[in-house]
Image (cartoon, grey):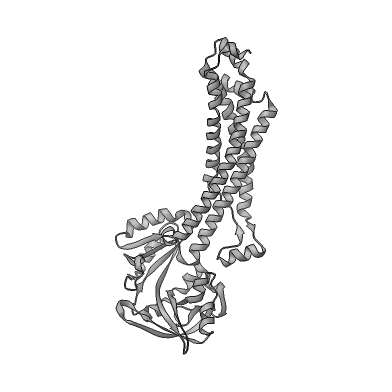
Amino acid sequence: MKTIFILAWRNIWRNKRRTIITLSSIFFAVLLALFMRSMQLGSYGNMIKNSVESYSGYIQIHELGYWENKSINKLLEHSQSIQDSIENLPSVNYVIPRLETFALAATETLSKGVAVIGTDPEREDHMTKLSEKLVAGEFFEADKEGILISEGLGNYLRLGVNDTLILLGQGYHGTNAVGKYPIAGIIKLVNPQMNNNTVYMPLKTCQYYNGSPNKLTSMALVLDSYDAVKKTTARLKEDFGERYEIMDWEELQPELVQLIQSDNAGGVIMLGILYMVIAFGIFGTIMMMTMERLREFGVLISIGMQKLRLAGLVFIETLLIGILGLLVSFMAGVPLLLYMYEHPIPLTGSAAKGIEEMGFEPIIPFSLDISIFYTQGLAILVIVMLCLTYPYLRLWWLKPVESKK
């Protein structure tokens, strides 16, 4: 085996120009594929992070059957012991208790349907950064009745800071929900729909308004990263699945999942085209190498070398070229991706403005997911193995007499 390996190594360097051209084609293809895939997965990760941390959280816990029609009567008891046990799970940073309902917001002359979100101000701000979206007034506090309204709603109702907003709706189990609340501040939300009809109020105030003390519609979980979502969701379902409805961000935001899947499919197609080009390059090299050495192969077979051992020699030669190409690519690709991961590309001008309006950070981030590397390596090795079909067939049907011609 050692002798065959040494022969294979010498053979690939007999024609240095051909080998270097093949290695170069593999190098540039894999480096480009690593860059493209890292940028793509990094963008997905950033998109998910910005989206789920703008409102929904990575996981939500509801009363059984709540999500289907979001009824105000499907409320769960706010248990501090359960909240503490959830926050003690690995990867869970904190839990945001919420009570969400709909109401008619009114002034003396105008009215509009709004979404009312009762929440813990400090925890909510930690995830959604509401205080950074404040355009007027002050941030609301847990022990005061002051509320936040979205900028679009304030403009429509012609209300400002320190004005009073009247809310009318249906509370828990059919009770009347009526109240008037001072406006502590006005926030500008990036989501146009939410910016036109959203009211944030302290959780206790919202519970009193709905006649539902110590009740919640949901608990939103914030995790270390979206990579921990599957494992944490499975753990929560194991511990609380019979009592609560547990949904991850993919179930909460199916539109985002579809957007990522469609874009990912386009990226895979582009990589497929790239590797098709590389496959033809590698195949051309192997075909030329085989044609140039037919006489050599014929002589070796004539003096008694088995075709199987000769095929093994060709296999090792081709495999060495593929592995060398991958090693050189990874040696250049890993430092490049590490740098890009630490220094994402900032967007400027209209592109940055458009991204910010969608609620996303105006950068092009990169990912260091291990799958980026092993999928590219696997793709190259599969291409090499497929290209070996040609020399194997030529060796199988090779007749030593004909190879001398």
The picture places residue 364, in percent across and down from the top left corner, at 61, 56
Residue occupying the far bottom of the picture: 108
Residue 328 seen in the figure: no
Q: Nearer the viewer, residue 65 or 326?
A: 65
Q: Nearer the viewer, residue 126 or 148?
A: 148
Total tally of numbered discs in the picture: 0
Q: Residue at x 59, y 44 (%)?
A: 33
From the viewer's perspective, is residue 270 above or below residue 126?
A: above
Q: Nearer the viewer, residue 395 or 307?
A: 395
Image quadrant holding the N terminus, namely top right
Image quadrant holding the C terminus, namely top right
User: Is residue 184 toward the left or the right of residue 86 in the image?
Assistant: right
From the viewer's perspective, is residue 273 above or below residue 73?
A: above
User: Is residue 72 toward the left or the right of residue 24 in the image?
Assistant: left
The picture places residue 82, in percent across and down from the top left corner, at 35, 65
Residue 129 seen in the figure: yes
User: Is residue 68 toward the left or the right of residue 8 in the image?
Assistant: left
The picture places residue 122, in percent across and down from the top left corner, at 48, 72
The picture places residue 347, in percent across and down from the top left corner, at 64, 60
From the viewer's perspective, is residue 299 above or below residue 5?
A: above
